[in-house]
């Protein structure tokens, strides 16, 4: 049922449904066989590489949307110059603490002035 170059065909296949039909087997059997032999992982890695190469070609053409997608794919999704979320949250927490301390000082001074 599975030809000798089946692994290569599976890894590079765009449609596993069509491949299963061509090999005269059902899709679930093909997927089970592929998982057992780790072909599914190789298939995923192959198509990730193909997608990244396509994005790289578009980046070389200076396409902004491709640049953004490539940055997302490499884990850099924040625009240049924007601080990390943790740093912004820390800054907000410090400002809130300072505002609370200021409010407490004002209330304490009002109590002292009323005495």
Image: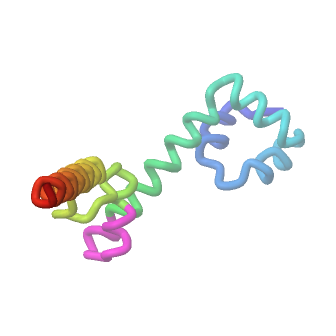
Quadrant of residue 52 within the rendered picture: bottom left
* Span colored in magenta: 57-69
Q: Nearer the viewer, residue 74 or 81?
A: 81
The residue positioned farthest toward the front in the image shown: 115
Q: Residue at x 18, y 51 (%)?
A: 101
How far from the left and from the top, in percent, is residue 62?
26, 75
Quadrant of residue 28 within the rendered picture: top right
Quadrant placement of the C terminus: bottom left
Q: Residue 58: say if magenta.
A: yes
Q: Does residue 37 lie above or below 104 as drawn?
A: above
Query: Is any part of residue 63 visible from this angle?
Result: yes
Quadrant placement of the N terminus: top right
Q: Main secondary structure of the magenta part?
A: helix
Q: Nearer the viewer, residue 88 or 70?
A: 88
How far from the left and from the top, in percent, is residue 44?
56, 42
How far from the left and from the top, in percent, is residue 63?
31, 76
| Left or right side of 113 for 89 | right
Q: How is the image coloured?
A: rainbow
Q: Does residue 4 lie above or below 99 as drawn?
A: above
Query: Is any part of residue 84 visible from this angle?
Result: no
Q: Residue 44: say if magenta.
A: no
Q: Does residue 13 lie above or below 64 as drawn?
A: above
Q: Residue at x 50, y 41 (%)?
A: 45
How far from the left and from the top, in percent, is residue 43?
58, 41
Q: Residue at x 84, y 33 (%)?
A: 29
């Amino acid at each position: 049922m599975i030809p000798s170059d089946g692994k290569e065909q599976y890894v590079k296949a765009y449609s596993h449904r069509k491949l299963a039909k061509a090999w005269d087997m059902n899709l679930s059997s093909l997927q089970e066989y592929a998982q057992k032999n780790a072909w599914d992982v190789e298939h995923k890695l192959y198509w990730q590489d193909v997608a990244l190469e396509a994005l790289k070609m578009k980046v070389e053409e200076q396409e902004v949307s491709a640049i953004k997608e490539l940055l997302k794919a490499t884990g850099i999704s924040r625009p240049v110059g924007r601080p990390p979320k943790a740093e912004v949250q820390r800054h907000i927490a410090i400002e809130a603490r300072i505002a609370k301390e200021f409010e407490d000082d004002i209330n304490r001074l009002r109590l002292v002035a009323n005495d």
